[in-house]
Structures are given as C-alpha cells and as structure tokens.
Image (cartoon, rainbow, N blue to C red):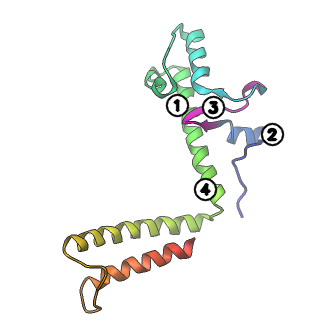
Amino acid sequence: MFRRLTTEEPQGNVQWMHNMTGIKNREVYLRDYNGEGDLSLVDYCKKECNERCDIDIDVGAEEFGEYMYCGCIVAQFYWIAVGHAELRAHLSEYEDSGLSYKEVKNLQSLNRELVHVIEYTKIAIRNGLDLGYIHKCDSSYVWYRKVIEALEKVRAVK
C-alpha cells in the first residue's frame, strides 16, 4: 500500500513541501502563502520582478510565461513552481484513482494495444470491412477479435 503524498490539508514541513502549489482555473497558486491564503504565482512573480529588477510586467497569467526566459532567480522560481504544480496535479489524479503502479502500467499497455486495434480497424473499414457481418474464415476476423478482446479488457479494468 502506498503512502499518499498529495493532500489539501498539509501538516508539517514535508507535506507542505509536496503540496506548496496548486492549480485553479489553469493558473498556478502558491498555497496558503504566509498564512494569508492562496497567492497567484503570476502576481508573486510580478511583484518580485518589480522589486528586484525594476520591471513592470503588465500581462495576464496566460501570457506571463513568455516573459520568464531571462534566467534570473524569479524566472527560475516561476518555472520550478509551474513544474511542481503540474506534477502535483498529475500525482493527485493518480492517487485519487486508487490504482496500483502495476495496474497503471497494465492500463498503459492496454492503451497502446487499443491504439493499434483502432488503427487496424480504421484500415479495415476503409478497405470495405463490414463489422456487422464477419465470417470466421475472413482475414478481417482477426482484427474483429482484437477489437472485441481489447474492449473486454477495458470493461474488466472498470
């Protein structure tokens, strides 16, 4: 059994380290910054750029990253925080799923298999395959069976 790393109510330094950022409405936030609630990463970096570099960046969150390529400490912090928030969001989704690492690997393998089956099926349909009637002697039957087997595996996972 794994120990969950993401939480909405971190306790202690280690949990805060793992949960210091969050994403809301496609924007990164520094969670409970200085005990004053969540602070927009963009607002924080704008303030730091103004104080440290005397630069006033007046753009929205969507465009802000375009100004963070100067290599200064604020830009480095910005990209580290964005990366942290995205990783935390993906990890949280995984932890919420309740799937084990092995189950996730099996799903990834199944997904690759499904992609191949879908591609084979598209080719077969383009070449005149009628999925409504396939005889077992027909060479298309192999593709049809792969589709059925893949769908059964997906249903079994659910």
Q: What are the residue bounds of the magenta stretch?
A: 22-34
Q: CA distance from mark 3 to mark 1?
A: 13 Å
Q: Amino acid at mark 4?
A: Tyr
| Residue 139 on image: x %, y % | 24, 85
Disc number at residue 12? 2
Q: Quadrant of residue 50?
A: top right
From this view, report whether residue 74 is shown above or below residue 29: above
- 76 or 55: which is nearer to us? 55
Q: Amino acid at mark 2?
A: Gly
Which residue is painted at 53% across and 26% down in the image? 76
Label located before the other in sequence (4 or 2): 2
Residue receiving disc 1: 79
In the rendered view of the protein, which quadrant contains the C terminus?
Answer: bottom right
Classed neighbour count for the residue bearing mark 3: other residues with Cα under 10 Å, few (<14), some (14–19), many (≥20): many
Q: Quadrant of residue 69?
A: top left
Foreground mark, 4 or 2? Answer: 4
Residue at the far front in the pictured view: 132
Q: CA distance from mark 4 to mark 1?
A: 23 Å
Q: Secondary structure at mark 3?
A: strand
Disc number at residue 94? 4
Label located before the other in sequence (3 or 1): 3
Residue receiving disc 3: 29
